[in-house]
């Protein structure tokens, strides 16, 4: 396939069109399931072996085809407008199928040793590195990763193993790291993996694959000292600029840390966490307090461990700072962090100052609803943090969070409570009282609040995900024997029809 650039353009376009058919059409689960076993096995072998080798030969001789695509992705990422064209991920030149696009990038990741050291360096130091391109390709068509399980139940048993396809892609990412030419390139792999995790969009399957691949490397390949050093470096980097890490990024980081903390050198990682927490407390940096609460897997450690004790001290220091915090930004960060820590330490022998926390939380919540500031983002974060805190405290048996339910019921027309995330959390807060006996007359204010909440969240004007969550939480009341006699009265008649399709989908639903 070697030749001039002109020949490459001509033959490359033909090759890419062929890949589009092989990877995109011939490998679809629906087509394979309709074939005799022998033929489908042969087609699958052709796609995964012959085509992959040819694709690697083409890309290693003409790496500009890949580099041009990475530049195209960079332009796509930098586009600020929200037009349909901007949201649609560009594919490799000549490729029309997202599945084919993903499989070609997977071939490059798996066969990275085919490329020279210089080419590997170009692929991993690009503004949009190879791992990010792969993650974006997976997210472009995430359902197809599990398409093998979507065939008929009578299809070949070999094609019904749902985990195999996911594991194949994860192993490809992990093997890529082990096949790089130099330790410096492995460092670039880690850097690009961290970028994928931190910058991942909500629900990114590609980012989750990178997390699992990194965890696999830590457990099976890397030494404990190397893993510990990497984790310490990540903690230093993320606390330098916590505002740049999205909620999704924090969730992915926690998933990574839950895996890699298990293989870290216990003494060294404890020193790292202790040092970082001390610095955060000394600097009164509540943004980093929230971040550390959300990414460190405190719940994995036994009560007698040093890190568990560090987390408890971290919690107490944050509570003590509530009196001195004046800005809603700092308070919101504290409440968000406490909502994560409190469930872990709820059953600790040392009691948590729940009443003290709640006094500040309720006051801040009411102030947020009264806010008339132009910059509402901080106040919105405060409302959502307090709602999550109240949910976790009420699920743990803290009855005073019912006061917040009453405030929500009285203010369900407020724009801040109708935002998607806040409305979702209000529904969860309502459901957290499903096991509370609401039959006594003294509970009438709570029943009125629930009617206001369900009556608002089940309206057609609300997003589907919010209405679905409201239905889920209402079912909790219907299935708790203590409240079955009054369940129907908790939903106004004008929105009851929203519940019927949902309930009828549940086997035995009444």
Image (cartoon, grey):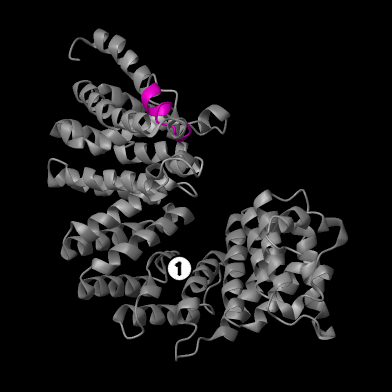
Q: How many marks?
A: 1
In the image, is 375 to the left or to the right of 186?
A: right
Q: Which residue is mark 1?
A: 286
Q: Residue 280 placed where, x, y %?
A: 37, 70
The residue lying at 26 percent from left, 74 percent from top is 270
Q: Residue furthest right?
A: 493
The residue lying at 76 percent from left, 57 percent from top is 499
In which image quadrant can residue 286 be found?
A: bottom left
Q: Residue 72 placed where, x, y %?
A: 38, 26
Range of magenta residues:
21-30
Q: Residue 99 placed where, x, y %?
A: 42, 32
Is residue 295 shown to the viewer in this render?
yes
Please, is residue 10 above or below residue 94 in the view? Answer: above
* Category of crowding for the residue at label 1, using alpha-carbon neighbours closer than 10 angstroms: few (below 14), some (14–19), many (at least 20): many
The residue lying at 48 percent from left, 86 percent from top is 347
The residue lying at 61 percent from left, 61 percent from top is 379
Q: Residue 46 placed where, x, y %?
A: 29, 27
Q: Secondary structure at mark 1?
A: helix
Q: Which image quarter holds the N terminus?
A: top left
Please, is residue 303 above or below residue 109 in the view? Answer: below
Please, is residue 229 above or below residue 123 in the view? Answer: below
In the image, is 490 to the left or to the right of 469?
A: right
Q: Nearer the viewer, residue 259 or 504?
A: 504
């Amino acid at each position: 396939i070697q030749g001039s650039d002109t020949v490459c353009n001509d033959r490359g376009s033909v090759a890419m069109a062929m890949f589009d058919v092989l990877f995109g059409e011939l490998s679809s689960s629906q087509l394979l399931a309709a074939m005799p076993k022998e033929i489908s096995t042969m087609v699958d072998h052709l796609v995964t072996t012959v085509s992959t080798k040819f694709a690697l030969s083409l890309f290693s001789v003409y790496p500009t085809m890949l580099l041009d695509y990475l530049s195209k992705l960079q332009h796509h990422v930098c586009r600020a407008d929200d037009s349909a064209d901007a949201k649609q991920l560009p594919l490799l030149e000549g490729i029309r199928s997202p599945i084919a696009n993903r499989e070609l990038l997977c071939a490059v990741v798996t066969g990275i040793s085919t490329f020279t050291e210089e080419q590997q360096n170009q692929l991993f130091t690009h503004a949009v590195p190879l791992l990010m391109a792969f993650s974006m390709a997976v997210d472009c068509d995430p359902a197809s990763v599990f398409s093998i399980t979507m065939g008929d139940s009578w299809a070949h048993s070999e094609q019904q193993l749902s985990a195999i396809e996911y594991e194949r892609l994860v192993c490809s990412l992990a093997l890529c790291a082990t096949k790089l030419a130099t330790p410096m390139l492995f460092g670039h792999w880690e850097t690009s993996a961290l970028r994928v995790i931190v910058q991942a969009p909500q629900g990114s399957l590609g980012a989750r694959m990178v997390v699992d691949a990194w965890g696999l490397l830590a457990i099976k390949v890397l030494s404990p000292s190397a893993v510990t050093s990497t984790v310490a470096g990540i903690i230093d980097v993320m606390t330098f600029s916590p505002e740049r890490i999205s909620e999704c990024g924090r969730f992915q980081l926690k998933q990574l840390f839950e895996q890699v903390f298990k293989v870290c050198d216990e003494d060294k990682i404890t020193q790292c966490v202790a040092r970082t927490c001390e610095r955060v407390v000394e600097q009164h940096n509540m943004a980093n307090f929230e971040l550390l609460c959300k990414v460190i897997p405190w719940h994995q450690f036994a009560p007698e461990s040093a890190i568990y004790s560090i987390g408890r001290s971290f919690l107490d220091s944050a509570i003590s700072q509530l009196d001195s915090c004046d800005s809603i930004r700092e308070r919101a960060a504290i409440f968000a962090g406490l909502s994560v820590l409190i469930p872990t330490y709820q059953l600790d022998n040392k009691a948590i100052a729940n009443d003290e926390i709640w006094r500040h939380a309720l006051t801040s919540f009411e102030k947020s609803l009264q806010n008339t500031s132009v910059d509402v983002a901080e106040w919105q974060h405060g409302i959502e943090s307090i709602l999550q805190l109240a949910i976790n405290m009420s699920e743990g048996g803290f009855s005073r969070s019912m006061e917040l339910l009453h405030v929500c019921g009285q203010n369900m027309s407020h724009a801040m409570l109708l935002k998607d995330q806040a409305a979702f959390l209000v529904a969860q807060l309502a459901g957290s009282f499903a096991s509370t006996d609401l039959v006594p007359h003294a509970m009438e204010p709570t029943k009125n609040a629930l009617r206001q909440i369900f009556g608002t969240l089940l309206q057609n004007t609300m997003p589907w995900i919010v209405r679905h969550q409201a239905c889920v939480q209402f079912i909790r009341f219907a299935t708790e024997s203590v409240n079955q006699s009054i369940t129907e009265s908790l939903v106004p008649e004008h929105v009851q029809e929203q519940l019927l399709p949902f309930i009828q989908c549940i086997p035995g639903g009444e």
